[in-house]
Amino acid sequence: MRGVPEGFDETSPIFSIAAAAELAGLHAQTLRQYDRLGLVQPSRTSGNTRRYSMRDIGRLGQVQLLSGEGVSLEGIRRILDMSDENRELRIRVRELEGALADAVMQQQGRRVFAAGTAGITTIRAGARPTKANQVVVWRPQRRD
């Protein structure tokens, strides 16, 4: 991100409770209550002062939205917990898909095919097709 110091991202705990409350459009006491209920769990400094990240500010917005729709605070907590679990599982699935793709690509005897005017033929992994008008089909490695 441009203009953001190195090492800072959306999870960097940089906002005081007053700044977070202003950004979220809430009262600081509301943020304290949400912390006690586990809806938003800001980081703490060595002096036990709350520090909020941009992700925390976004979560406060979600709490406000759900509350405005009539969802109870306990319901909101459950929704947010499931949302967090879903995000973590999606990340894990992407990691496992990448690991599986890497394992498949490293297997001995994997097959690469070339398609040309004569049809589809198998070629040795790493070899180039013999004719310039052939198309090679392979599965590239993902880079996230």
Image: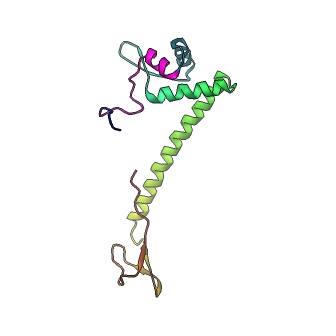
From the viewer's side, name the closer residue of 29 and 44. Answer: 29
Residue 14 belongs to magenta span:
yes
Seen in the picture, residue 46 relative to 70 is either above or below; the reply is above
From the viewer's side, name the closer residue of 15 and 136. Answer: 15
On the image, the x and y values in percent for residue 69 come to 68, 27
Seen in the picture, residue 61 relative to 91 is either above or below; the reply is above
Seen in the picture, residue 10 relative to 137 is either above or below; the reply is above
On the image, the x and y values in percent for residue 64 come to 60, 24
Q: Which residue lies furthest to the bottom in this view?
A: 118
Query: Is 84 left, or right, of 128 in this rendering?
Result: right
- Name the residue: 38% across, 23% down: 14
- Name the residue: 55% across, 27% down: 61
Q: State how many labels appear.
A: 0
Quarter occupied by the N terminus: top left
Residue range corresponding to the magenta coloring: 6-24
- Name the residue: 52% across, 45% down: 90
Q: Residue furthest left?
A: 6
From the viewer's side, name the closer residue of 144 and 17. Answer: 17
* Applied colour scheme: rainbow
Q: Residue furthest right?
A: 70
Residue 83 belongs to magenta span:
no
Query: Is 66 left, or right, of 36 in this rendering?
Result: right
- Name the residue: 51% across, 13% down: 28
On the image, the x and y values in percent for residue 131 come to 36, 84
From the viewer's side, name the closer residue of 29 and 40. Answer: 29
Seen in the picture, residue 87 relative to 25 is either above or below; the reply is below
The answer to which image quadrant residue 26 occupies is top right
On the image, the x and y values in percent for residue 55 come to 47, 30
